[in-house]
Amino acid sequence: MKTGRIIKSIGGWYTIRDINTKEHFESKASGKLRYVRLDEDSSFNKQTTMRTKKDIKTVQISPKVGDIVLYDDTDDNYPITKILPRRNQLDRPDVSNIDQILLFFSTIRPDFSFNLLDQFLVLIEKAHIKPIIIISKIDLIETTPLNKLKANLTYYETIGYELYYVNSKQKIGFDVLKDIFTDKVTVVAGQTGVGKSTFINALMPGLELKTQETSDALGRGKHTTRHNELYEYSGGLIADTPGFSKLDFNIFDKRELKDYFIEFDSYKSECKFEKDCDHVHEPGCNVKDNENILPSRLENYHKFYDEIDKQKERY
């Protein structure tokens, strides 16, 4: 058996890149991968209900882009025989073992949304992946609204997030990004139409990923990326992923949400109820009305908290 990483998935076929030789092989999943018995600590076992413990169960495991796998090099079809434990994984986009996510947001068309940014950050923090915020289409917005947007976004840098501004058509801002891909698996993610594929085409001109402009009628982009694939670039791997206009929370316990607003840690020790404070209704809370926290962050936290609270419980 040899070890490789899945770098492309389409129509039940997988492209594997050998870990050592970097050779590529076209493969299908072995039949014995269809059903695997998982224990509670398995990296493939995900919480999908309100249960506090993950079930021990037999499930169907499908390979996904980013998986490290064992494959049979003695068989002409190079079947995948085992998927090794995942460090992390996402469902949308369907990629595993990710080092960092470039979160793409455009200044306009579609308009920038702090609500969507905070949703992304919550889900990425939950998945224990490093987020990097990229603001695109800076050439399409007037100076005054751009400066106002930058002023608010400075807050995200102060709490520890990396943030960059790019113009993919003129490759403005690309010089400071050149070293962030080395030895990393990077996912480029964001709303449809924010310029993810345009950005990757500017990095790798020979790739010629299909792009489409934002629909004026819908106010958002049209889907152009049809499958998941990792492209080799600058000593690392980059995935362009299908865009979308709405994210779904996979959080089932509202008390968990505060852990993913990273700046709250700096203030919770002064809350009256400390670790038990949800920063919503409690008296003596040092977070819910804190002037040092960006107002839209607090507003979005309360919106997400209510959204999770109103979810129908699944058991």
Image: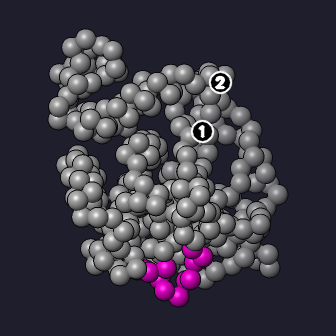
The answer to the question of whether label 2 and label 1 lie on touching residues, with beta carbons closer than 8 A, is no
Residue at coordinates 51% horizontally, 50% vertically from top-left?
A: 88
Q: Secondary structure at mark 2?
A: loop
State which region is magenta.
201-211
For the C terminus, the quadrant is top right
Residue 25 versus residue 135: which sits nearer the camera? 135
Tell me residue 58's x, y (percent). 74, 38
Residue type beneath disc 1:
Lys
Residue 249 locus on image (x, y percent): 53, 37
Q: Is residue 2 left or right of residue 99?
A: right
Considering the image in quadrants, where does the N terminus appear?
Answer: bottom right
- Work out whether 298 lies above or below 194: above
- Residue 141 visible: yes
Nearest to the eye among marks 2 and 1: give it: 2
**Mark 1 crowdedness (10 Å alpha carbons): few <14, some 14-19, many ≥20:** few
Residue bearing the label numbered 1: 46
Image coordinates of residue 161 in percent, x first then y, are: 28, 52
Nearest to the observer: residue 39 or residue 265: 265
Taking the spot 79% from the left edge, 51% from the top edge, the residue there is 34
Tell whether position 142 is magenta: no
Q: Quadrant of residue 226?
A: bottom right
Q: Which residue is mark 2?
A: 314
| The furthest residue to the top | 283
